[in-house]
Amino acid sequence: MADYRADKALAAAVGSIRAGGDPWENFTALQRAERETMDTTGAVAPSEQKRVTEREQRWLEEALGQGNLVAATALFPDPFRKDTPVYAPERFASVRKAAMDRVLTAAEAALGHRGEHAYTDGWVLHAAANIHAAGTDQARNAAQAVQLYEAAYRAGDTLAALGAARLNQELGRPEAAYRWALQCLGPCQTQGFDLSEYQAGLTPKAIEQAQKGAAP
């Protein structure tokens, strides 16, 4: 029964999206409807989901073909966060390689920007950091990832502070990890985030110095 209800809702969602519209807007609209449908109905394997996936993949490929960097970055979620921007991203593995190359190239260009950043710089730097931190699409490189998280933060993506804190901690840099944890405010903090975890083992002097110069 749940799959039947989901099939009806998914078919309606596909039919409600205007043909010929912006492919990324169409993709995100259908993703939103799909996520809501699967969550509310409790469906396991509705047959209509195959058609939805095919439609989403086509729009995603079109968006990437248009050079949409937001579409590219969305395929590489932050491994330290649970709020994934793409629903069931494993379905789009066939387009990840092209997207990864585009993200890494754009991130390299963003690293060369001085002064004023383009509005997409923070996103592509964060996504490139995610690629290196996750180790799913290529060999994991924590040192490169932490540099990119820090660069993403400086380019305006404040959510990247969490990755910078976690990886500095992993790399045995407790003072830097604590300094970045201090920058992780509001939405940056995931469930269970505990600043005291980053203070552990630091001397009072080190804590005071980090707090005084919290902005790296």
Image (cartoon, helix red, strand yellow):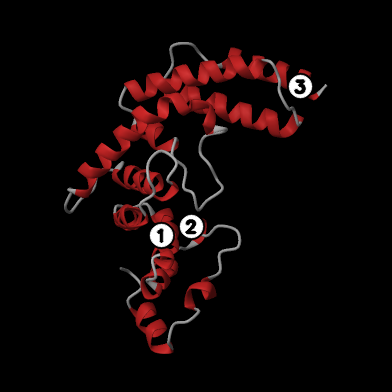
Q: Which residue is mark 2?
A: 188
Q: Position of residue 205 (x, y in %)?
A: 38, 88
Labels in figure, total? 3
Location of mark 1 (residue): 161
Looking at the rendered structure, the kind of residue marked 3 is: Asp
Q: Residues within 10 Å of mark 3 (few under 14, many from 20)?
A: some
Which secondary structure lies at badge 1? helix
Task: Give the residue type at disc 1.
Answer: Ala
The numbered mark at residue 102 is: none
Q: Secondary structure at mark 3?
A: helix
Depth check: 137 or 53 in front?
137
Q: Amino acid at mark 2?
A: Cys
User: Among all residues in the image, which is located at the extreme right?
Assistant: 1
Q: Nearer the viewer, residue 104 or 62?
A: 104
Of pointers 2 and 3, the one earlier in the residue sequence? 3
Q: Quadrant of residue 100?
A: top left
x and y percent of residue 162 in the render? 45, 59
Q: In the image, what residue occupies the spot 53% across and 73% down?
A: 197
Work out whether 133 lies above or below 103: below
Name the residue that disc number 3 marks. Answer: 3
Give the vertical position of 174 relative to 170 (above or below).
below
The image quadrant of residue 161 is bottom left
189 relative to 57, above or below? below
Measuring 44% from the left and 82% from the top, which residue is drawn there?
A: 202
Residue 81 point in image, percent of width and height: 52, 51
Residues at marks 2 and 1 touching, judged by CB atoms closer than 8 Å: yes
